[in-house]
Amino acid sequence: MTEKEATEETAEKAAAEEPAAKKTTKKTTKTQKEDSAKVETVVSDKSMVYLDFVAKTKDNGIVYDTTLLEVAKKEGLFRENDRYEPALVVVGWNWLLSAVEEQLIGMKVGESKTIEVPPEKGAGPRDPNKIKLIAKVKLAKQGAKGYKGEEIKFGNERGFVTADLGRRARVDFNSPFAGKTLIYDVTIREIVSDEIKKLQAVLRRRIPGIPEDRYSITHSKKVVTVELPQETRYIENIQYGEIGIAADILKAAEDIDEVKIVTTFKRPERKAENQT
């Protein structure tokens, strides 16, 4: 065999072996990624979970909030535009009461728990200084009439009229739950471990009602790009929703340095002209 023939034979062998080497490299990389992805089975600090809950006051058992449709209808809480589905919670982010979130730690998917929240960890004690006498003429300027039981907004405060005293009304600006012990019956439905699913979850929370096939999230190096459809432009105060999306994504994915939010506008389909 000549030197030229030997060189050509060596080159042919290298070319034949190259695809196999590349395939092995890809497989190793995929395996490493799969091994590095931690699937959470127990709720811990900063875990992202979906949960159902029923919230009520301990003293009289009145239900005031729930994620369950049948409970909402039974308790007279049902509202047509509300969503009745498991709530997204990140432990430590205070999307629920912090006293509730911290009690989720250690729970598993499918597990249920009753959590009791004392007033000091809930709405706080009742404050007598938040009960005020206000002239009805002042209430009228805020669009209120001053009758007993009326919920009003006065300045930056919200309260309830507890007594009609002629020209004045007594208004209680304490939270309706001030001084009350609260009960939360919770059930863990899912622990979100996948990074892209986490980003999709915070997006859905900020802009509910948009079908998943109408938006996309891509993650390249340290940048996340969110593509939204043009109908989101018609959502009231959408700019604040987008700020919230970016803030949540940066908080949920600590390896991300930048979030880009892009709105896609597509040319309307042209109607076929009538043929004569």
Image (cartoon, rainbow, N blue to C red):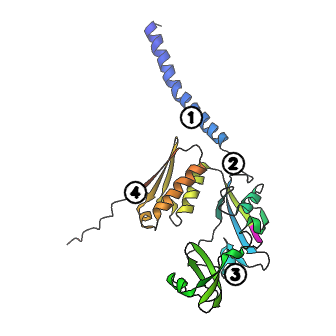
* Kind of residue indicated by mark 1: Lys
Between the C-alphas of marks 1 and 4, the distance is 33 Å
* Kind of residue indicated by mark 3: Glu
Mark 1 = which residue?
Answer: 26
Q: Quadrant of residue 118?
A: bottom right
Dot 3, crowdedness within 10 Å: few (<14), some or many (≥20)? few
Q: Main secondary structure of the magenta part?
A: strand
Mark 3 = which residue?
Answer: 75
Q: Secondary structure at mark 1?
A: helix
Between discs 1 and 2, the one toward the N terminus: 1
Please tell me whether residue 76 belongs to the stretch shown in magenta.
no
Give residue 139's position: percent from left, percent from top. 55, 83
Mark 4 = which residue?
Answer: 264
Between the C-alphas of marks 1 and 2, the distance is 22 Å
Between discs 1 and 4, the one toward the N terminus: 1
Q: Secondary structure at mark 2?
A: loop
* Kind of residue indicated by mark 4: Thr
Between discs 2 and 4, the one toward the N terminus: 2
37 lies left or right of 262: right
Between discs 3 and 4, the one toward the N terminus: 3
Residue nearer the viewer, 167 or 186: 167
Q: Nearer the viewer, mark 1 or mark 4?
A: 4
Residue interval drawn in magenta: 181-185
Label placed on residue 39: 2
Q: Is residue 245 above or below residue 273?
A: above
